[in-house]
Image: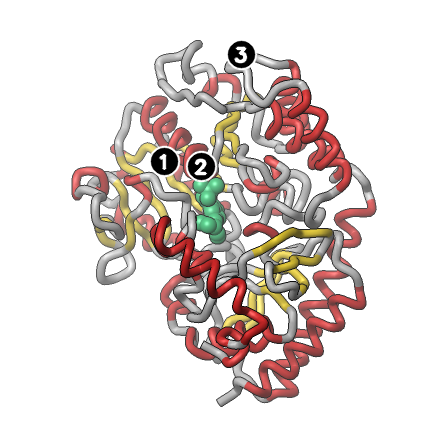
Amino acid sequence: MTEASRSPENRGSACAFEAASRVMPGGVNSPVRAFGAVGGVPRFIERGCGAILHDIDGREYIDYVGSWGPLILGHAHPSVVKAVQQAANRGTSFGAPTEAETHLATLIIERVPSIEMVRLVNSGTEAVMSAVRLARAVTGRSLIVKFDGCYHGHADALLVAAGSGAMTFGTPSSPGVTSGAAADTLVADYNDLASVESALADRGSDLAAILVEPIAGNMGLVPPVAGFLAGLREICDRTGALLIYDEVMTCFRVAPGGAQALYGQKPDITCLGKIVGGGLPLAAYGASVRIMQQVSPVGPVYQAGTLSGNPVATAAGIAMLEALDDPTIYDRLESLSARLDEGLREAARSAGVATRHARVGSMLCTFFTDSEVTNFATASACDTQQYARYFHAMLDCGIYLAPSQFECMFVSSAQTEEQIDRTVAAAREALTLTAC
Ligand code: KE4
């Protein structure tokens, strides 16, 4: 823990963390927020405005977490807030259909190339869990292939990590996940088609789906190498399996139509989350009409949710997607992100620190390693202790990064060139300070 984390100016967060830890596991409602990977006291946030987070000790941070991706327009975007207020004034939930859900579903279908019909749910976990169930039902098969280092939420069948070697039967990565729940999940190496082929040598006929983050964002940022996504498409076409893109993080982030639009690929089922909910609990999964007609109540695949398509969350999602129609937004995100990426690379060079950098659109990552990062094994070789020192040095400079080497930085359109330059200057100082 750095001096600043113990220092008086963080006393509020330290006290709040102690109180929270007495009533909630780890004092948080999602593990990564607890700073377990970097140590120290998580900052308790009082409010967010644009690109800035304000903590309860009165400190300000330029925010590159953006609530883990949803806040591509920054905090408290006026049109999102207004839509939420107006919706809430009409009632917060009805448990009955509303035209707003049709509106948001239509906006999604218009933007995401492979989606003809969509179901709104409450979280990315729920979207992916439902997509896997749907793929198993449509194909009548059981096996799912996922990739080591890709995260798809905390459904039992997907809390599965590779055992030894590149390809193994999934082994549960959490107590409480039974071997039965993991038995039909195979784990392959990202960017390695051969690792998928070798697993299917004698089981391809039982493959229901390949599930992939088309741009991996949960082992740091690892883009697909040339041919990887097309190769997964070919394997699915050849075996009769479905291809599921988990675009919870990437859709509307790297392009309005997500990674599938960016790379010109066509999955069978797409999972959405984060940005699509405008910062409120809303996610979705979608596919062709043929596939989605298998979902209850039209089809036999059961999936339900008390608050699915919630009117307040739906209003936020509509406002977010409509605000992203501003043709200058993605150009601004590209300009700001390129400026940041170039600055961080130069800062590492001038500090003499071995790093590798990745960027796709407004998703970026600095890996503390001297080797190329193309999968979980190479990502895992990063110096996570050096990342932790860098994280705290940046936090002390008022720069809020993800508290883990295995996450991404997200730029929002609310950031300014001045804030980007201030971030680069802080990185130069932090890298020099923590180089040893
Ligand atoms: P949620 O259930 O957290 O809404 O979404 C799960 C999920 C699914 N798919 C992808 C590609 C994801 O990145 C996520 C969630 N992302 C993490 C951070 N990388 C959320 C942060 C957290 O767990 O608190």
Q: Is residue 6 left or right of residue 340?
A: left
Name the residue beneath numbered marker 2: 244
Give SS at disc 3: loop
Which one is nearer the viewer's eye here, 150 or 135?
Answer: 150
Which class describes the residues within 10 Å of circle 2: few (<14), some (14-19), or many (20+)? many
The tag on residue 96 is 3
Give SS at disc 2: strand
Compute the Cα span from label 3 to label 1.
Answer: 32 Å
The answer to whether marks 2 and 1 mark residues whose Cβ atoms lie closer than 8 Å is: yes
The kind of residue tagged 2 is Ile
Q: Residue at x 36, y 18 (%)?
A: 301
Q: Is residue 415 left or right of residue 240?
A: right
Q: Quadrant of residue 52?
A: bottom right
Of the two numbered discs 3 and 1 in the rendering, the one whose residue sits closer to the viewer = 3
Name the residue beneath numbered marker 1: 209
Res. 150 in view: no
The kind of residue tagged 3 is Ala
Quadrant occupied by the N terminus: bottom left
Q: Quadrant of residue 234?
A: top left
Compute the Cα span from label 3 to label 2.
Answer: 29 Å
In the image, residue 66 sits, relative to residue 273, either above or below, namely below
Which one is nearer the viewer's eye here, 40 or 186?
Answer: 40
Compute the Cα span from label 2 to label 1.
Answer: 7 Å
Which class describes the residues within 10 Å of circle 1: few (<14), some (14-19), or many (20+)? many
Of the two numbered discs 3 and 2 in the rendering, the one whose residue sits closer to the viewer = 3
The kind of residue tagged 1 is Ala
Res. 163 in view: yes
Which one is nearer the viewer's eye here, 322 or 23?
Answer: 23
Q: Quadrant of residue 109?
A: top right
